[in-house]
Structures are given as structure tokens and as C-alpha cells.
Amino acid sequence: MVLDRILTPDGTRFITPDGSLLNSLATINQLPADLRDQVYHTLLPDDLLERFGIDKVTLCNPRGEKVVFIDASPHTGLVEIRVWRQLSDRDPVLYIQLVDTVNNQMLVLLFVTNDPDAPRFQVDRDWGGEPTKFGTLTRNVEAEIAAMQAGLAPGQVRRGLRMSRKILPTFEQFVARLGHDMYMMEPLAYHTALLFESFGCAYSRGRRRMEWIQQEFQPGGELFQRLDSSTPFRMPEMEQTVRGRSWAIYDGVLNEPFTDIHMYKNIGKQSGVDSFPDWKW
């Protein structure tokens, strides 16, 4: 990768061919495709590429298959990046979806890693093969029970790669090179919010709700009492772990959806937010 085509001499900012600074996904997407992709390739962690034998220059696996795909229309401020171990796999090993906000901040819509060698659970499809959309449209309860018993959290079809902390510095460098000192995310599940907290993220909206959840999962609390064995996802003692709480919340123990949680991360800084002290997975 020839980085001097896309970076200032000091390596701190992304630039266009005429030397103008890039400051958003929309400006990246307007570049010629080869330069656009070079910018997005800087999001790919070396550890991930090395783990699956993906060549850093050709982005091909040992079979010679190109396994990195970027979807970024020049008319949008949105990008989707998929990295595969091999094209015959059902799930990518890395999926990233980012978007510009109306205030020119960067929002992480989705970030997923999958271990392609781990067992797969069809929680993303119901018994008829229709998408569940993270359980918002329909559910595959049998698959969910199996996934839960295997140690997965809601929404996971496989075990992750456990590389998020290694990927974080690469991502933060990408954001900084666009001239931003922070980025945003909207966790889709309780366990995701807790993981983001552990990465140093804070809440722009939803902290009180997270603290209320912590309070009401304590013995005698409202959520604690709802762990009444009425479903496999509401068993006593599930309040003791992040994963157990997340399954109960996914199952509706809040009596309302887990939505409207907004978080942010200041680059290179830790917020110290900890709504579930000393949590266990």
C-alpha cells in the first residue's frame, strides 16, 4: 500500500490527490475507487490479516481469492467493509458499517467479528428461513437457547475473534486521520453497551437507564424478581453476568425494547464509566 498517496507527509491526515484534507466518509467516497479503497484498507488490522493469511497488498487469501470487499457509494456518507477467510464461508470474519452523522461525526452502526471455525447458530433466521433482524421481526428460540448454552450473547451467530481491543487503535487512528477527536455508536444490546464501556466509551444518552438496570437486577429489584423461570432466558441467577442479563433483556424482561442508547468515545481517552462494576461475561 502506497500511503503517501493518501496521507500528509507527517501521516496524521488523509488527503485528496490535490492535497485537500479529507474530513468525512462522504469525502472519501468521492475519491477515485482505487484511492478510496486505499483509505479504507487502513482500517484492516495487521493481526487480522496475518491470522487468516491475507496478503496486505493484494488482499487475497492463500487460495488466491480476493476476500476484502468495500461498499461505498460516491453519493453517500456510508461504508460497509467485509473481510472473509474464504469466499465459501457463510459469515465474514470482520464486518464494519460506518456512517457520517448530520453533524459530521462518525457513527459506528455495526462492528462484528466471527470465528469461522466456531459452531454456528442460526439465530439470524427463523424456522422458515426468514431473517430475524436481531429478534425484532421474529425469533428462532431453539437456536437462541443453543447459542446461549454455548456461551454466546444475543445476536451472535458464532463466537467472536476476541480481537476488538487490538482493532480499536487501528480504528481510532482512522478517525483521527479524518480530523475527528471522537466517534459515536449506538449499541444494539445490553452486552454491547457494557463492552463499549470497557473500551472507554461514555454515554450521550442512556446512562441513567443503564444505572437503573444495574439497580433493578440487585436482589429484590424489579428486574431481579422478573427472573422467574417463565422462559429459558429468565432463569434465576442470570442477573449475575453480562450475558445472562443481556439474554433476559433481549427476551423482554424490561417490558420495552432496549433502544435509544447513544455512546461516544474520545480518541485515546478512557471515560471511566462502569454501570456494572466487576462484571463477569
Image: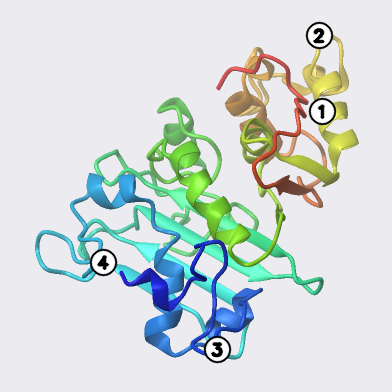
Residue 195: x and y in percent read 61, 35
Q: Quadrant of residue 209?
A: top right
Give the CA separation, mark 1 to mark 2: 12 Å
Tell me the kind of residue under disc 2.
Pro
Give the CA separation, mark 1 to mark 3: 43 Å
Secondary structure at badge 2 equals loop
Q: Earlier in the sequence, mark 1 or mark 3?
A: 3
Q: Which quadrant is the N terminus positioned in?
A: bottom left
Tell me the kind of residue under disc 1.
Ile
Report which residue position mark 2 lands on.
Answer: 219
Disc 1 and disc 3 in contact, CB within 8 angstroms:
no
Dot label at residue 213: 1
Secondary structure at badge 3 equals loop
Report which residue position mark 4 lands on.
Answer: 67
Give the CA separation, mark 4 to mark 2: 49 Å
Q: Earlier in the sequence, mark 4 or mark 3?
A: 3
Secondary structure at badge 4 equals loop
Q: Is residue 2 left or right of residue 5?
A: left
Question: Is 126 drawn above or below residue 179 in the view shown?
Answer: above
Give the CA separation, mark 4 to mark 1: 41 Å
Q: Nearer the viewer, mark 4 or mark 2?
A: 4
Disc 4 and disc 1 in contact, CB within 8 angstroms:
no
Determine crowd level at label 3: few under 14, some 14-19, many 20+ residues with C-alpha closer than 10 A: some
Q: Is residue 247 left or right of residue 103?
A: left
